[in-house]
Image (cartoon, rainbow, N blue to C red):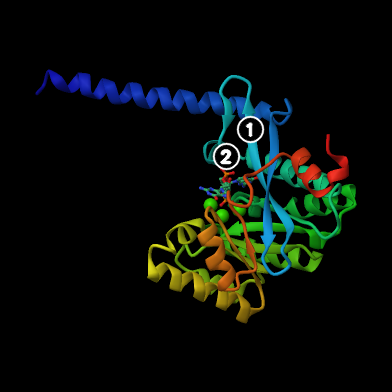
Amino acid sequence: AKKAEPGTICFFEAADDKSARDRKALQADLELAVARDELFLVFQPFLNLRENRITGFEALLRWMHPVRGLVPPSEFIPIAEETGLIHEIGEWVIRRACATLAEWPVDIRVAVNFSAAQFHNTGILQAIVQALAEANVAPHRLEIEITESMLLSKYGSASSILNALLQLGITVALDDFGTGFSSLTYLRKLPFSRIKIDQSFISDMLAQPDCAAIVKSVIALARDLNIGVVAEGVETVDQLEYLRQTNCDEVQGYLISRPASAEQILALLDPKKQR
Ligand code: C2E
Ligand code: CA
Ligand code: CA
Ligand code: CA
């Protein structure tokens, strides 16, 4: 056994070293990504079922790495959060989203994802106000998406920022609803305009009656609270029909559209500008 151990340990060390080195390299590259213009936004529509029209888009961040190609946000957002780069990147996302929104019709909104760390940045409110002013976009067209896990760690600063956003006319959505432990508490305490039912519920609802009951109840709850409700991750016509029957306001998912570039969206919204 003594003989085999060093080899075993060495194997794990090598693997750790590699991933640590990989992470360091990715971190260094990410620091340059903003300046090198490697970040970009894609947009995924919200389809309003009552009005039967696209009411807005969620901005989703992408990183085109010069060597690695497309790096998913699940890989680089955590690095951005750990290193503090998320502040610069987050403000860039808001500026970009507002500038893009300025080219769209006034009845279209854009939703931007927030990281917990951004609640620590006291300058964030001013950055948002400035981005809206520079793009000449009305505040009510901007929505901020936050998850309840973010509230868990930073409830104090989060609630004061959320209330300030609301005073500015910016709406806030509770993302990934149902995946945490205290969704209902937050719903009661904070001024959300909308809840987004997590895609895990949508993907299971037609196979699991319990799950369907939850989705139905959340939609009814939103209506009773007089706030909007979006179903995330809608992939099939059957899911869409079920959500229509249960009076869900809005749906989002690959069935309606995958996230698309700003140019594609503009063409979709204004066919005259196509080609
Ligand atoms: P999220 O906010 O919950 O975004 C939804 C994710 O589900 C997106 O993945 C989207 O592309 C994907 N999706 C949409 N429709 C479907 C569908 O029908 N089926 C399936 N399987 N997936 C669908 P994406 O773009 O990879 O983003 C992952 C996460 O990264 C986001 O989850 C969000 O938490 C984070 N993220 C993205 N952009 C930003 C950003 O600008 N800032 C921050 N802080 N986080 C971001
Ligand atoms: Ca989101
Ligand atoms: Ca989500
Ligand atoms: Ca999510």
Quarter of the figure with the C terminus: top right
Mark 1: which amino acid? Trp
The answer for how far apart the CA atoms under marks 2 and 1 are is 8 Å
Q: Nearer the viewer, residue 233 or 143?
A: 233
At 69% across and 33% down in the image, what residue appears? 39
Q: Secondary structure at mark 1?
A: strand
Q: Check contact, mark 2 vs mark 1: CB within 8 A.
A: yes
When asked about the image quadrant of residue 166, the answer is bottom right
Vertical placement of residue 176 versus 29, above or below: below
Q: Is residue 197 visible?
A: no
Q: Which residue is mark 1?
A: 63
When asked about the image quadrant of residue 210, the answer is bottom left
| Residue 160 numbered mark, or none | none
Q: Nearer the viewer, residue 212 or 77?
A: 212
| Residue 73 numbered mark, or none | 2
The residue carrying mark 1 has its beta carbon less than 8 Å from ligand 1? no
Q: Nearer the viewer, residue 148 or 50?
A: 50
Q: Residues within 10 Å of mark 2 (few under 14, many from 20)?
A: some
Mark 2: which amino acid? Pro
